[in-house]
Image (spheres, rainbow, N blue to C red):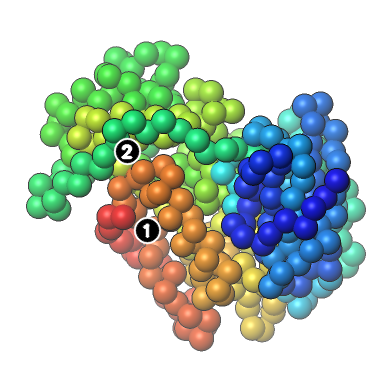
């Protein structure tokens, strides 16, 4: 059933007869690919091949739309920074599409019917053994094909640029001329009414607040609210499905939005958040990076590796100086430019991305709230 496959590209890649899966983990002792059928039944396949810490395998018969995730085994020793737990279903860091969300209350993951499911202990003791699969988001295999036609970037000079920052849902939800069924969606921003409004204002580029799949912070969920702004990323390649009129086709809808804006002479710039992830601090849920290889993806405190260096005010700091993490970020940027045709990026808390580990102790004492940065074109 499983062929050797190849380590790159990472993520899920469709090929003739099936799909290749690849995921990076330095300290894992075992990795299982978890495939889910339409009824939610899970099939686990051990990835026996590992090349330069990338676990990989080719699974025949996999098609577009396949739901999947990973379970990663290894040492559970938070005091040393290791938080492997095969009982937790993990999102693919390279997932192009995501289904479902993580929600909390009082430090617990909730099922859709609000039954509490405890997650892993914060710092010590045995790992939690409750299976999180029924409550965790899942990755989706996509083929990425799209008819771009004669799409071309407007490539407007900076001196002529009129930048308009907007929230995809908020802007389209409140515009009275956007068709009601498209309000709050990527398709709504691509509608004739939305584009006419932008053109009437003289806008030449829209800067979209984060549209990658995100999580809600524990404190926000405790108040019965959601993170409206999206600055709490969970997947750096996948668009937020809540903003899609057809969540199962969110990727295509984003591409259609970009194509429509380009046709109107409007550039698309993404606000991207690579400085932290939505998994939060040491009390947060294990949904992706933490369970794949905590010591690879996050900066840990020297005096207590069970805690995170927090340069972002969001509970953790992504370890950008690690080659795999830098690869992930660069691959994400490349994907949005080459596959989705966006025109540029605005980096949230950009200075954090350039701080090496040696600077963390001093930087921890400094404020990051004013560390906003300008846009750059692709």
Residue 43, position in %: x, y? 86, 41
Q: Which residue is label 2 attached to?
A: 166
Residue 123, position in %: x, y? 78, 68
Q: Is any part of residue 98 visible from this angle?
A: no
Residue in the picture at 76% in, 67% down: 50
Q: Mark 1 or mark 2, which is nearer the start of the sequence? A: 2
Residue 346, position in %: x, y? 33, 54
Q: Which residue is label 1 attached to?
A: 347
Figure quadrant of residue 140: top right
Other-residue count near label 1 (Cα within 10 Å), few / some / many at <14 / 14–19 / ≥20: many
At mark 2, the secondary structure is strand
- Residue 341, above or below 148: below
Other-residue count near label 2 (Cα within 10 Å), few / some / many at <14 / 14–19 / ≥20: some
Figure quadrant of residue 351: bottom left
Residue 65, position in %: x, y? 66, 32
Residue in the picture at 14% in, 26% down: 200
Q: Is any part of residue 133 visible from this angle?
A: yes
Residue 37, numbered label: none
Nearer mark to the viewer, of 2 and 1: 1
Would residue 347 be found to the left or right of residue 156 on screen? right
Spatial distance from mark 2 to mark 1, Cα to Cα? 15 Å
At mark 1, the secondary structure is strand
- Residue 245, above or below 105: above
For this orientation, the residue located farthest to the front is 16
């Amino acid at each position: 059933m499983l062929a050797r496959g190849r380590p790159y590209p990472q993520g899920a890649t469709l090929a003739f007869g099936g799909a290749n899966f690849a995921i990076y983990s330095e300290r894992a002792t075992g990795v299982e690919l978890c495939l889910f059928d339409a009824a939610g039944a899970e099939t686990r396949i051990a990835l026996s091949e590992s090349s330069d810490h990338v676990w990989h395998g080719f699974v025949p018969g996999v098609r577009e739309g396949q739901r999947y995730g990973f379970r990663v085994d290894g040492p559970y020793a938070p005091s040393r920074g290791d938080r492997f737990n095969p009982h937790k279903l993990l999102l693919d860091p390279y997932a192009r599409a995501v289904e479902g969300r993580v929600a909390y209350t009082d430090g617990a993951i909730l099922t859709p019917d609000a039954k509490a499911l405890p997650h892993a202990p914060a710092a010590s003791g045995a790992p939690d053994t409750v299976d999180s699969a029924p409550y965790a988001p899942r990755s989706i295999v996509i083929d990425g094909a799209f008819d771009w036609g004669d799409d071309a970037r407007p490539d407007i000079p900076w001196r002529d640029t009129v930048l308009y920052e907007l929230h995809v849902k908020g802007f389209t939800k409140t515009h009275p001329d956007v068709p009601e069924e498209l309000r709050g969606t990527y398709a709504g921003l691509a509608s004739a009414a939305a584009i006419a409004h932008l053109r009437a204002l003289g806008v030449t580029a829209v800067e979209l607040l984060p549209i990658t799949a995100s999580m809600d912070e524990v404190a926000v969920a405790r108040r019965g609210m959601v993170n409206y702004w999206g600055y709490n990323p969970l997947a750096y390649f996948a668009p937020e499905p809540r903003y899609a009129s057809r969540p199962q086709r969110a990727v295509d809808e984003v591409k259609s939005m970009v194509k429509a804006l380009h046709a109107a002479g409007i550039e698309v710039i993404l606000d991207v958040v690579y400085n932290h992830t939505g998994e939060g601090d040491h009390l947060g849920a294990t949904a992706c990076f933490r369970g794949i290889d905590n010591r690879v993806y996050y900066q840990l405190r020297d005096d207590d590796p069970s805690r995170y260096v927090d340069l972002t005010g969001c509970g953790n700091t992504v370890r950008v100086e690690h080659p795999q993490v830098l690869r992930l970020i660069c691959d994400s940027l490349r994907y949005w430019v080459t596959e989705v045709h966006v025109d540029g990026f605005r980096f949230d808390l950009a200075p954090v991305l350039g701080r090496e580990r040696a600077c963390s102790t001093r930087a921890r004492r400094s404020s990051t709230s004013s560390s906003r940065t300008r846009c750059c074109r692709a």
